[in-house]
Amino acid sequence: MCGILGFYGNDKASYLTALGMFAEQHRGQESCGMAVSDGKVIRLRKNMGLVKAVFTDQALKELPGNIAIGHVRYPTKGSATEFNSQPHLVETLAGPCLALASNGDIVNYAEIRSWLEHRRVYFKSDNDGELLVKYIAYKVERENKTIPDAIKGLMHEIKGAYSTVLLTRNELYMFRDPFSIRPMVWGKTSDGTVVVASESCALDTLYASDRKEVPSAGIIKVNEEGISVIENGVNLYRQEKHQSHCIFEQIYFSRPDSHHFNENVYEVREKIGAELAKLDADLEADCVIPVPDSSNFIALGYAQEKKLPLSLGLIRNHYVGRTFIKPEQTIRDESVRQKFNALPNFFTDKEIVLIDDSIVRGTTIRQIVDLIKQAGAKKIHLRIGSPQIKYSCYYGIDTPTREELVANQLSLEEIRQKSGADTLKHLPMEALRKCVTSSSDYCYACFNGEYPVRNGKI
Ligand code: SF4
């Protein structure tokens, strides 16, 4: 999971892009970067770390221009290094200078890279953003294609998830994979600046209205002549199912104040909570506690349905970051201990319903249950707002291998015992489908193994 940003038509493009990237910081905290064009030169800055640390006032002053793209990275393909951070910049000899940032993963990466390497295209990183920009540059420079035609070719040949922004010296492009797996929305500010982002919460920060999704397999070009929609939601692979939005964006990844895939994210989460509560008609408890923050609205939905009080018994230190998106287990473990604390004298002798969004390795929830037990809770009923995760994700989320997923190692009862909870229930798949209006337009592959795009290892 990463976050992308794009701007066209504002002299403060670098400042505004940094603001938008900050709104999307939850989508990636390992590194960030920005490319800005002043019409003649594209300047690039990227580094490890958070947006506020990398893009200081001085750094932004050194990025003049009115077109920009930005990226916050959470590493999936390629290690957490500056080399692999985005955007990637390519100077072609005869053609344009291109910078690209993308959210998602390419499933036929090895095949396309090898095809390009056989044609003497060299790579500096293992990142799929570099693959996309080198592919486009090759088609433009060596096959004399226009950029839109190169992107159309890319959509036929490169498989996977990619919500992408591309910058030339005087144009901004936005395009998206044929299944629109990751979110991507665009809009305009009152002064006519065009803004594109992974999530609408970034557009809110920038007062951009008139929002639309970038369509599946859509290509939109913005330049001094205006906005041209070059491709608009074609069913590229002519399959019956031609949209496969990531359901986990609704459950966990996206901010609750975002709106995408025609849903308010917080409302989907409330419905998930209500569906979970329906599994517990006979359960009596003192209160409902979310694992903050991603489970807050699921817990709210549960509490409303069960008519139980919602209590914020766990306090999260917001300066630690998300545990699931820390790349190493040791860092994840330390983060959990630093991240959560229990309210003093709150849990004593209480029977609680503890709500979390998912269980991946099972280590985080064990520590949280432990913390609440030590704080005096009498009984913990653990409720999870998603089905069991049994398959890895190949579309931009760093889930572990199938063998490492706890749902493939232990039975549900063994997971309950390992977690330390008194009871454990997951949201069934059919109940999850009821929480979105167009349930057939989603990917559920990490629960059921039905991958919308397959290649090689999948
Ligand atoms: Fe989302 Fe899971 Fe599909 Fe990956 S496999 S895109 S995490 S639903």
Image (cartoon, helix red, strand yellow):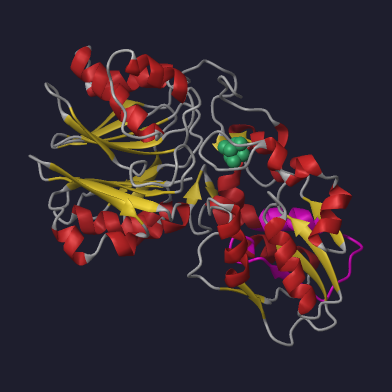
Q: Residue 348: x and y, percent?
A: 81, 84
Q: Quadrant of residue 214?
A: top left
Q: In the rendered image, is residue 312 in sight?
A: no
Q: Residue 435: x and y, percent?
A: 67, 47
Q: Residue at x 66, y 37 (%)?
A: 446
Q: Residue 396: x and y, percent?
A: 51, 39
Q: Nearer the viewer, residue 178 or 455?
A: 455
Looking at the image, residue 24 sits to the left or right of residue 247; the answer is: left
Magenta residue span: 270-295
Looking at the image, residue 443 sits to the left or right of residue 39; the answer is: right
Q: Nearer the viewer, residue 387 or 326?
A: 326
Residue farthest to the front, as pictured: 330
Q: Residue at x 35, y 44 (%)?
A: 85
Magenta includes 287?
Answer: yes
Q: Quadrant of residue 229?
A: top left
Q: Is residue 237 above or below residue 30?
A: above
Ligand 1 image position (quadrant): top right
Residue farthest to the left, as pictured: 40
Q: Residue 223: x and y, percent?
A: 17, 36
Q: Nearer the viewer, residue 331 or 206?
A: 331
